[in-house]
Image: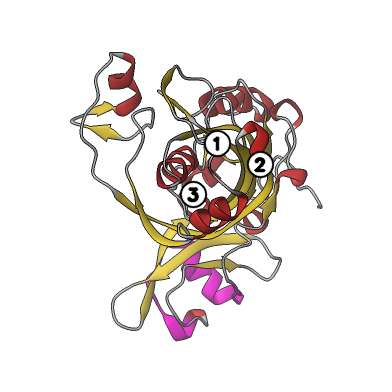
Amino acid sequence: MARDSRRDESGPESIGISIVDKAAGWTSHDVVARGRGTFGTRKVGHSGTLDPDATGVLLLGVGRATRLLRYLTDLPKTYTTTVVLGIETSTLDDSGEVTATHDMGHVSAEEIEEIAATFVGDIEQIPPMVSAIKIDGKRLYELAREGIEVEREPRPVTIHSLVVNAIDLANLRFDIEVCCSSGTYIRTLAADIGTKLGGGAHLTNLRRTKVGSFHADQGLPIETAELISPAEGLRDYEAVEVDESTARDVTHGKVLLAEALGVSGAGPWRVLDADGQMLAMYESHRGDTVKPAVVLVIAP
């Protein structure tokens, strides 16, 4: 993939998207902190938390591109992990303390595949206590550290696909590859599969292999990470190229007729100038109009 300069075409500020392959042992916040040194700016953010023990794709926004992160967060994600049957843990992964054990020697490969398939589609999940969701102003993982467990409302998520691989009945474990909507907790999915199989489970070796169209093999360690342009970083969204006159209106942040912008449907849309530089993200507005959600290149 072609890499762009770390400097914005319109000024000295670093701006762009970085595809990082996060190493185990790093929190997402650690990666952001290191990214500030890598890219020479404090304006660095990430598009979706990965657990410290998890590895894989973490997309960073740098400079004004941090304002685009919500679009990257909304992209579907793909994970691989190993589900370990018969053992429940306090964190639903192998970093926690064992809280329950089950005799699950009766489980067959056919049962595993049949039960896993029942989770494909629109489902509800109860967020784990080790998640970053806030309840009454406090994050769940902070409460969990204090030994407090609170009631959590189930949340809707979508499992687009779930493939079972490498079933090892002797050691009561199997691998899964999951493509899912943003907000899905893979550790909860593993635990729920274990429960539905008549016992319990936790996961290990969690890796995010894909975010939208970005693959882990395109990622780099944060120490050597590079930037791609906002236009390339938002490539999963439809693009529209505008003429010079419309580009001026866009950089002034004007609400436009959808017809004038040359778009239809629900959006959002990347708005590019004739040189392919991304000017803004536009979204549907009232009636037949569209409005700027993020303007990257502001008229002087």
- N-terminal of the pair, mark 3 or mark 2, is 2
Q: Which label was assigned to residue 143?
A: none
Percent x, y of residue 92 = 45, 30
Q: Is residue 244 left or right of residue 220?
A: left
- N-terminal of the pair, mark 2 or mark 1, is 2
Residue at the image point whose x is 78% and y is 47% from the top: 3
Q: Amino acid at mark 1?
A: Gly
Does residue 284 belong to the magenta stretch? Answer: no
Labels 3, 1: front one:
1
Residue at the image point whose x is 67% and y is 34% from the top: 170
Whether tag 2 and tag 1 are in contact, CB under 8 A, the answer is no
Q: Which label was assigned to residue 73?
A: 3
Cα–Cα span, label 3 and label 2: 14 Å
> Where is 252 relative to 29, above or below?
below
Which residue in the protein does label 2 denote? Answer: 18
- N-terminal of the pair, mark 3 or mark 1, is 3
Q: Which residues are magenta?
A: 239-260
Element type where label 2 sits in the image: strand
Residue 195 shows in this picture: yes
